[in-house]
Image (cartoon, rainbow, N blue to C red):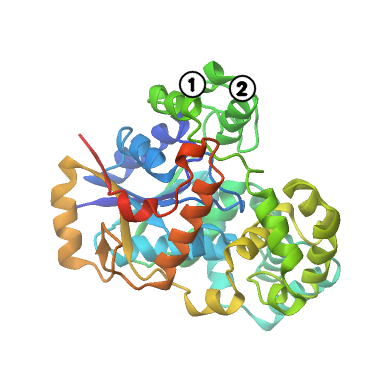
């Protein structure tokens, strides 16, 4: 049995994602596709627009056979931890033979060399990294330049400026030797491109939805009726929906508690405390803290970690997934589920009631906050993770 894993967010699921799943199956020769998908929070540190079960259903109807939830601990984390969490989850199933991700195949040898260097950091690399940080460079940029300079890999920093390449590097660094990488070149719009085209970016689709251009957005997604129903019923979470909750949290935290939040280092908590006193929106808060060294995405993740109460100690303690939580599967995937149950090193979970697991508890807390920020008041009840079972698709 060949099984291809995909680590994803699908915020929202669009035709480019369906295209990737089709190519991943074709080029890996996989019998089944397993997605490790972010739940209520995505890697930019914001809450997803649509519910995780809706996004899972769209993936299942468009090429996936099984969708697992990537725990919030890893979904809202820097690229190395995001990749490590996703790879560990998929590898822990005991059945995944391939991992497919967006990347130009020609870049794979360069990224493979860089991943080996980063896995075995030399004193020269550490010194070059520190020099870059001392110059005020963001950590990803300083790390890439250090690898380029000390590893003899010209052009690496320019390559890693591309979002797909940066994540591809982290996937390769985390990937066990038994799992084969399957790079798929990006087609259509670029990652940050807001123009709607036949293969639009998630950025473009979200922009169209937030601007009320529903018909334009629906043309870019498979199963448009699912997105239309969510949008018209108010089953959506705007990125500023929890601004008041976040500002309240920051304004009432003491300095020591805020300093303990994951990602909060080098006195950054003082900047957050000061910004929270005057900011009126989430965006204003992050822009007030932002500097050359601290990227918007990093600060966004820190803000969400503060809202969720994720500390650096918690992140260090839980550095790998502890279970595999099923968000949905196709009926035809029963052979896959049976093989996973036979070989997995992680408990395969479909219901969470009665399970004492800190990572699951964090996921529940995040889902409750997603619901609290839902546009429709009728959908804001807590505890949905306890009442909703996995999505089952034909």
Measured in 3D between alpha carbons, the distance from the residue under mark 1 to the one under mark 2, in whole angstroms, is: 11 Å
| 45 with respect to 364 (left or right) | right
Position in image of residue 18 (x %, y %): 39, 33
Residue density around tag 2, few if under 14, some if 14–19, many if 20 or more, within 10 Å? few
Horizontal side, residue 371 vs residue 258: left or right: left
Q: What residue would you read off at disc 2?
A: 212
- Quarter location, residue 214: top right
Q: Is residue 84 left or right of residue 269?
A: left
Residue placed most toward the observer, 108 or 361: 361
Residue 95: x and y, percent?
A: 24, 60
The residue that label 1 is drawn on is: 218
- Check disc 2 and report its element: helix, strand or loop: loop
Looking at the rendered image, the quarter that the C terminus falls into is top left
> Mark 1, residues whose alpha carbon is within 10 Å: few (<14), some, or many (≥20)?
some
Residue 135 coordinates in the image, percent (x, y): 86, 68
Q: Residue at 56% across / 45% down in the picture?
A: 373
The picture places residue 343, in percent across and down from the top left corner, at 19, 67
> Closest to the observer: 84 or 187?
84
Q: Is residue 292 visible?
A: no
What residue appears at the point 72 percent right and 75 percent down from the top-left corner?
Answer: 259
Q: Is residue 255 above or below residue 227?
A: below
Which quarter of the figure has residue 93? bottom left
Q: How many marks?
A: 2
Q: Dot 1 lies on which element?
A: helix
Q: Is residue 40 visible?
A: yes
Looking at marks 1 and 2 on the same chain, the residue that comes earlier in the sequence is marked by 2
Q: Are marks 1 and 2 in contact (CB under 8 Å)?
A: no
Which residue is depicted at the point 21% across and 45% down?
31
Vertical placement of 90 versus 193: above or below? below
């Amino acid at each position: 049995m060949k099984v291809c894993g995909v680590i994803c967010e699908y915020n929202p699921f669009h035709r480019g994602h369906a295209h990737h799943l089709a190519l991943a199956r074709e080029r890996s020769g996989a019998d089944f596709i397993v997605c490790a998908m972010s739940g209520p929070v995505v890697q930019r540190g914001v809450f997803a627009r649509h519910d995780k079960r809706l996004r899972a259903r769209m993936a299942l109807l468009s090429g996936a056979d099984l969708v697992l939830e990537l725990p919030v601990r890893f979904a809202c984390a820097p690229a190395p931890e995001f990749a490590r969490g996703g790879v560990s989850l998929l590898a822990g199933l005991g059945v995944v033979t391939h991992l497919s991700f967006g990347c130009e195949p020609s870049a794979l040898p360069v990224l493979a060399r860089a991943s080996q260097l980063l896995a075995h950091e030399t004193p020269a690399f550490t010194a070059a990294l520190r020099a870059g940080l001392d110059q005020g460079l963001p950590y990803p940029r300083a790390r890439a330049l250090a690898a380029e300079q000390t590893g003899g890999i010209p052009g690496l920093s320019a390559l890693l400026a591309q979002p797909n390449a940066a994540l591809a590097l982290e996937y390769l660094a985390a990937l066990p030797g038994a799992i084969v990488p399957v790079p798929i070149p990006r087609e259509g719009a670029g990652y940050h491109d807001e123009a709607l085209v036949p293969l639009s970016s998630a950025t473009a689709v979200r922009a169209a939805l937030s601007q009320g251009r529903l018909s334009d957005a629906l043309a870019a997604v498979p199963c448009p009726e699912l997105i239309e129903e969510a949008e018209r019923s108010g089953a959506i979470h705007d990125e500023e929906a929890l601004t008041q909750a976040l500002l309240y949290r920051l304004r009432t935290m003491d300095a020591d508690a805020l300093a303990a939040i994951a990602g909060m280092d080098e006195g950054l908590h003082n900047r957050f405390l000061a910004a929270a006193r005057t900011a009126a929106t989430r965006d204003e808060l992050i822009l007030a803290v932002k500097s050359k060294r601290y990227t918007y995405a990093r600060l966004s993740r820190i803000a969400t970690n503060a809202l969720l109460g994720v500390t650096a100690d918690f992140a260090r303690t839980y550095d790998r997934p502890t279970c595999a939580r099923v968000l949905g599967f196709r009926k035809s995937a029963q052979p896959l589920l049976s093989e996973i149950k036979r070989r997995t090193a992680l408990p395969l979970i479909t219901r969470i009631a009665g399970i004492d697991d800190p990572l699951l508890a964090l996921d529940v807390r995040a889902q409750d906050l997603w619901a609290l920020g839902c546009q429709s008041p009728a959908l804001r009840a807590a505890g949905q993770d306890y009442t909703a079972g996995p999505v089952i698709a034909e």
